[in-house]
Image: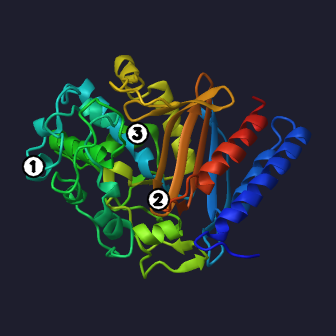
Amino acid sequence: MKRITGTPPLFIVLSLTLLHTGVVTESLAQSASPGDERVLEQALVVGIAMGIPGISVAIGVGDSVAWAGAAGYSDVLRRVPVQVNDRFGVGSITKTFVATVILQLVEQRKLDLDKTPQDYLDLEIVRAIPNTGSATLRQLLNHQSGIPTWEFQEDWIRVGRGDQMELGYVWGKTETLEYCTGDLLPATNEPGGRYSYSNTNYTLLGLIIEAVTGNDAAAEIRSRILKPLRLEDTFLESFEEVPGGYVHHYHYATPGFQEVAGVHRGFPEIRPYLVESTSANLSPEWTAGGIVTSASDLVRWAQALRDGELLGPETHREMLTYYPPREPRGGRSQYMQGIARTENYYEDYAILGHGGGTLGFTAGMYWLEDTDVVVVTLANVGVMHSGLLMSPVSMFFRDVWLPAVMRYLGR
């Protein structure tokens, strides 16, 4: 086969796999009855065939975990299989934990959602960031602050996820903020003007949690959420010890990634366009995306979020209230206070929850609106900065796994 210059064979493999996937899953769906685990097992096989190194999944029904499974490898080179309780990085799903703590502090009258970061943080670096004196905490929670994100600042990409990383270095909690000051990045919009996703919002919220409680953000998340819900596999990586660690992880080193980030010399190539990123840590992500956990823990967490277990009724309604931007941008998605909602995601169902992506990991944690179904997918491969319009993990979740789950549940 002739190779098209600059186009990874991965694209061709995925296209062929997805064509085959439709035939396989539809054929199995016709022969399988509700409750037949083969439809789930086959879907996991398809996910690995799509090139995902390792997958861990869990399904929640009501207030319990109805099914959990895993496929592929937690360590590709040593061929160590993924186990159902293995921990994965979950990226921005971390924001749901942080948003909950913020709203709990609002209930305790320690925070006011209509105040700004500068009302709580007397730090020069915070004052140097656009909109921190005018955007409200509510606008940080729902990404309408206009505060620029450090995540896509070109210098940070290389030192945070690319060829200029210092392996083994643990980033300070304010260190990423140095990459989104006004001399480097302008505000993306006036506060409340529109939705503009920014990791900086949740780094600032983490600092605010620490400022008003006097405790580490990790300790507040643990005492307020993890202990009450008995989430024993969940940790804020680099800021807590992670007993037993977590899975090896990998990243799609596409031509786009190589151009924007560069591949660190400590990231060995596993196969074309896939490198191992295990030698890196998640410290720069901190309260914007640094949690590692298991699929079953995330099912339990999604159920608590959905049912408002850790918030009062009024605050839970606040979390799930959408505040339209002054200039609606259309589309099917709405970002509330730490929770996203996408209309008609699967047939007529809307989904609520959060996705996550960082170096080495991609994750999804969602519940189907007006049902008791929660679906979690974790993968030990990252897609950030790769230029892929749709990651293999996203395609697996939407086109393979979710249809298989609904078939298994008879929905």
Q: Nearer the viewer, mark 3 or mark 2?
A: 2
> Which residue is painted at 50% across and 62% down in the image?
386
Q: CA distance from mark 3 to mark 2?
A: 20 Å
Q: CA distance from mark 1 to mark 3?
A: 25 Å
Tell me the residue that label 1 is attached to.
123
Q: CA distance from mark 1 to mark 2?
A: 30 Å
Q: Position of residue 273 (x, y in %)?
A: 58, 72
Q: Position of residue 249 (x, y in %)?
A: 52, 67
* Observer able to see residue 90: yes
Q: Could you classify mark 3 by the number of other residues whose Cα lies within 10 Å: few (under 14), some (14-19), or many (20 or more)?
A: many
Element on which disc 2 rests? loop
Residue type for callout 2: Met
N-terminal label among 3 and 2? 3
N-terminal label among 1 and 3? 3
Tell me the residue that label 2 is attached to.
384
Q: Residue 96 shows which numbered tag? A: 3
